[in-house]
Structure formats: C-alpha cells, structure tokens
Image: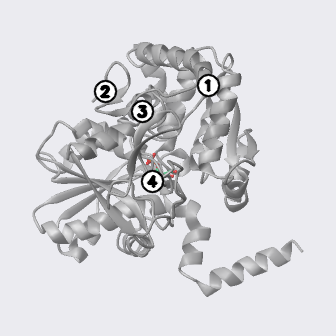
Amino acid sequence: MKSDIEGFFGKYGGRYIAEALRPSLIELDEGFKRYINDPEFLKEFNYILKNFVGRPTPLLYAENASKELGGADIYLKLEGLANTGAHKINNAIGQALLAKRLGKTRIIAETGAGQHGVATACACARVGLECAVFMGEVDIARQRPNVFWMEMFGAKVVPVTSGTKTLKDAVNAALREWSERSVDTHYLLGSALGPSPFPDMVREFQSVIGKEVRKQFAEYRNGNPDYMVACVGGGSNAIGFFNEFLGDRNIRMIGAEAGGISDAPGKNACRIAGSIGKLGIVQGYKSIFLQDDDGQLLSTHSISAGLDYAGIGPQLAYLAEIGRIEFRSIRDNDVLGALKFFARTEGVIAALESAHALAAAMKLAKEIGRGKTIVVNVSGRGDKDIFITAGAMKDPNWIEFLKTESKRYE
Ligand SMILES: Cc1ncc(COP(=O)(O)O)c(C=O)c1O
C-alpha cells in the first residue's frame, strides 16, 4: 500500500515543511521513485542485505514457549540477528545507497536511544559516506555505549542542547541542518514517519522483513498465520513486517505500544491504544500525537528507549483508523516478564522494544488457543539493553559489577 500523490494515507501524512526544505524533498521523492524500480539499484541493495546485513534473518518456531503457554503456536522472526542487532540497518543501507546515487557525500541522522544512529553510522562506513548523528545531550549521557560504537564507525555525534535535549530536539536540529545544507547532504530518517516521501521510502526498505516471512512461514505450514504481532515506535519494523500481508484479510494484525507504568499522560507512549493521542501536525507530517491542549508534545515514558516517541507513522495511523491493525498497550512489567520467558524457553534475548510484541503474543496465544498460529517480529536483540534490563531487575551482582568496574578507573 502506497500513499496518494500528495503523500497521504487517508488524512494522515503529507509534507508540512518550511519552503527551504521543499527542493530537497522533491529531489528525494523523484530519486526514490526512480531507483526503487531500478534493477541495478535493487541488485546492489540485495547484495548488501545478503552479504553484509546477513539476510534472510531466520523465522524460528518457538516450540518450547508455545508448549509451555499451552495455546497457539508462536513463530519468531529474528531481526536481532541482522548486523548491528536490529531491523534499523535495512532502511539505513537503502537510504545510504539512494543518497549516493543522488550524488550526496554526507549523511545526517537523528537518534534517541542510539540504535538508528548506530545503524546509520555502520551503513555509512560500509557504503563510504561521511556521517553526522544529531543526538540530545541527555541521550548522549544515558546511551554512552551506542555513542561509542557510532564514533568507532567514524561518525561524528553532534550534541543537541536545545529543548529537552532528547529525540524530538535531535529531529528538529537535523531538519534545520538539512534545510541549510542539502546540496551534498541527505537526511537519513530512521522510522516510517516524517514528511513524504519518508514514510513510503522507509516502508519499502523495511518490507524485506514481511517478504521473507511469507516464504519462510510457507516452509512450516500451509496458508497464512492467524495473527501477526509487532511493536510500534515510529512504525518502521511494524510496517515492514505487515505491509506484505495487508491484503490477506484473514490475518489479524496487532501493534504493541509502550504502556509504560500507567495510563496517565506522561507515563506511557500509547498514541492509539487507550485513545489519548490526538490529530496534529508535527515535524513535517500529520498523524496522531501525544500532545497537550496547546499542541506541545507530551513527555513519554517506556522501559524501552526505542518506543518512547510521541508520534506514530501516518500509514499506521490510517491502518488503525480503518481497523486493519489493532493496537494494544503493554506495561513495562509485562515486557520484562516476556523477555525472561523467551530467554529461558527459547534462548532468545529480545530487545526491550521487541519484548512488547512478545508480551502481547503471550497473552494472545492463551486467548486464541491451540491450533492457531502467531508470527511475532522480534525487531532487535537485547544485548544493547543490559544496563536497563539488569538495573530494572535489580540484580545485586550486576550492581556490584558496575561498582567494581568504576573503581578500576578511579
Ligand atoms: C529493536 C527496535 N525495535 C523497534 C524500535 C522502534 O522503532 P520502529 O517503530 O520504527 O520500528 C526500535 C527503535 O529504536 C528498536 O531499536
């Protein structure tokens, strides 16, 4: 499913930007439409996905977990086994290659938790482009390991000191920089949101996930899965996973949002589930946002840094409105429970973001019962979260380890 000629999915999407950015977006739109059907471009993209990213990622039948839950059969698409540990690299490679074809020599990106920054820096190292990643000062302090890896890949991490010094300020800073310097620079946006053509472009580069699932599921079972579940931050792993199957009306699709610690504003990041999100225009596109009465973005909370965003991609907002995708709110505690359960039963350590989808699937498996099937997109692996996960589990040995490590540097 593509947006209409103006970049809308129903009433969501579009291109609400300053005049200075218009030429860059038009150039990008034309370039994307040209290269996404160009056999030479696709050959290079697929070559890198195979030989560098490590695609196809496996689809695992989670036999032990399914048996223990006593309900539906669960299958796991293991995107965490892609290079850099998450699906983000698919889009980063696609856009880096496109930028090169458009004659750009430099990439800028925004990052919050650092995952998209790491994927972008990695893609730039591979493809041979200069890279600068805008990151809020607060995020730089709390995501030091990702900053370390970005710099290792040769990227410059640019601290953003305005506003709350977090993701939304990083996006604004990157957009500002792009409007001033687009001749040699491409803005590599990390999720299926922002002004058109980003939602279409990110979906296309991520849709390899769903295409692989179709083939892989057919090797296990006849027909389609009954349910598909993915976590939803901005929406790139979800739309990349669901897109291939949108026309298969017998499949029910579930988006898992960050239910945080309560339903109160500021304590979660549910834009759709719980219906507290409102229609708005922010950062160049129209969608559902968590905002106050003055239209300012609300602060959000989630145990996972990657789902902690106040907006949702326009295509997913539209698919929610027409009832094609249902959304569920998943609390932090259930996320940790799902993480532990799949580590113990399957040896899979999911990213905290992906563990939202796993928690939703655990409940669903019991609800719908035996004989049914669920495919979950495990968008990333959880090694990156060790500081948050071990801290949240209050593991005394981990705390002791941190103290010993810090003493080593005194
Ligand atoms: C592993 C993982 N999954 C999901 C997300 C959420 O992003 P999106 O909704 O664009 O897939 C992130 C964001 O950083 C992530 O790192």
Mark 3–mark 4 Cα distance, whole angstroms, equals: 19 Å
Image position of 154 with respect to 333: above or below: above
Q: Is residue 129 visible?
A: no
Q: The N terminus appears in which quarter of the rendering? A: top left
- Asked whether disc 1 touches disc 4, contact meaning CB atoms under 8 Å apart, the reply is no
**Which x, y percent locates residue 81?**
46, 51
Mark 3–mark 1 Cα distance, whole angstroms, equals: 16 Å
Mark 4–mark 2 Cα distance, whole angstroms, equals: 25 Å
In the displayed structure, does residue 310 sit left or right of residue 204? right
Residue position for label 4:
290
**Amino acid residing under circle 2:** Lys
Give the class, few, some or many, for how many residues have Cα within 10 Å of label 3's Cα (few <14, many ≥20): many
**Amino acid residing under circle 1:** His
| Secondary structure found at label 2 | loop
Mark nearer the N terminus (2 vs 1) = 2
Residue position for label 1:
186
Query: Which label lies toward us, 3 or 4?
Result: 4
Q: Is residue 360 visible?
A: yes
**Amino acid residing under circle 3:** Pro
Residue at 37 percent of width and 16 percent of height: 37
Residue position for label 2:
2
| Secondary structure found at label 4 | loop
Give the class, few, some or many, for how many residues have Cα within 10 Å of label 4's Cα (few <14, many ≥20): many
Mark nearer the N terminus (1 vs 4) = 1
Mark nearer the N terminus (2 vs 3) = 2
Mark 2–mark 1 Cα distance, whole angstroms, equals: 22 Å
User: How many numbered circles does the render carry?
Assistant: 4
**Amino acid residing under circle 4:** Leu
Residue at 66 percent of width and 54 percent of height: 164
Give the class, few, some or many, for how many residues have Cα within 10 Å of label 2's Cα (few <14, many ≥20): some
Residue position for label 3:
199
